[in-house]
Amino acid sequence: MEKNNSVMIGDVVFAPGQRANVNLPVADLYTATSLCMPLQIICGRNAGPTLFVSAAVHGDELNGVEIIRRLLRRKVLKSLSGTLLAVPIVNVHGFINQSRYLPDRRDLNRSFPGSARGSVAARLANIFLEQVVAKANYGIDLHTGAIDRSNLPQNSGKYGRCNDAGAGKGVRRPGHAQCERS
């Protein structure tokens, strides 16, 4: 089997077979305390796609945080082919404050693609896109209902070639047309 490629996050290169925790610097709090976005990288020994799984883009949506925690405890990850980038808490500011929003009252989910020199929301969106999303072939962003909000089950994405990885061939997704076979 073909060996996996290394992955670079920030200034650090992660080799095949390596599992590590990374703290991506986000922005300082008003108290000058540094705040980081936690990322766990599992770089499998064998080649395969890179998947990111993220949660808490809205800081008060907690279910995804636990789902990722449980995912990272799975023994099957020891034989992973490809790379997993797990970000249990994207909106660290909102999570700490138990709020959907960032301190500047912006909704992170409405701030993409962001910029390196913009608002807190713009910088966080930019870091997440450049350091996580851009490195992945596939992504799962977990959202849930929060206080005074309800979410019905849904998924969305580009399904034109959903059989690329062999998964989802002809699978019907709620609210979407059937996948095309390429």
Image: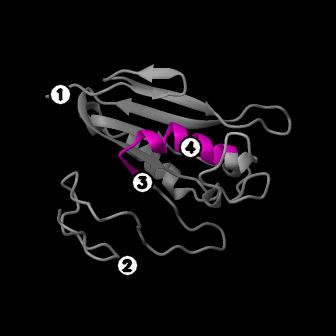
Q: CA distance from mark 2 to mark 3?
A: 17 Å
* Residue 86 rendering spot, x and y as whole percentages: 45, 41
Residue wearing tag 4 = 128
Mark drawn on residue 2: 1
| Whether residue 36 is visible | yes
Crowding at mark 3 (Cα within 10 Å: few <14, some 14-19, many 20+): some
User: Which quarter of the image is occupied by the N terminus?
Assistant: top left
C-alpha distance separating marks 1 and 2: 38 Å
Q: Give the mark, 2 or 3, whose residue is nearer the N terminus.
A: 3
Label 4: element kind: helix
- Label disc, if present, on residue 175 of the rendered structure: 2
Estimate the spatial distance between the alpha carbons at disc 3 and disc 1, rounded to whole Å: 25 Å
Q: Is the residue 68 above or below the residue 27 in the image?
A: below
Looking at the image, which residue is at 18% across and 54% down? Answer: 166
Q: Is residue 75 visible?
A: no
Residue at the disc numbered 3: 140
Which is more N-terminal, label 1 or label 3?
1
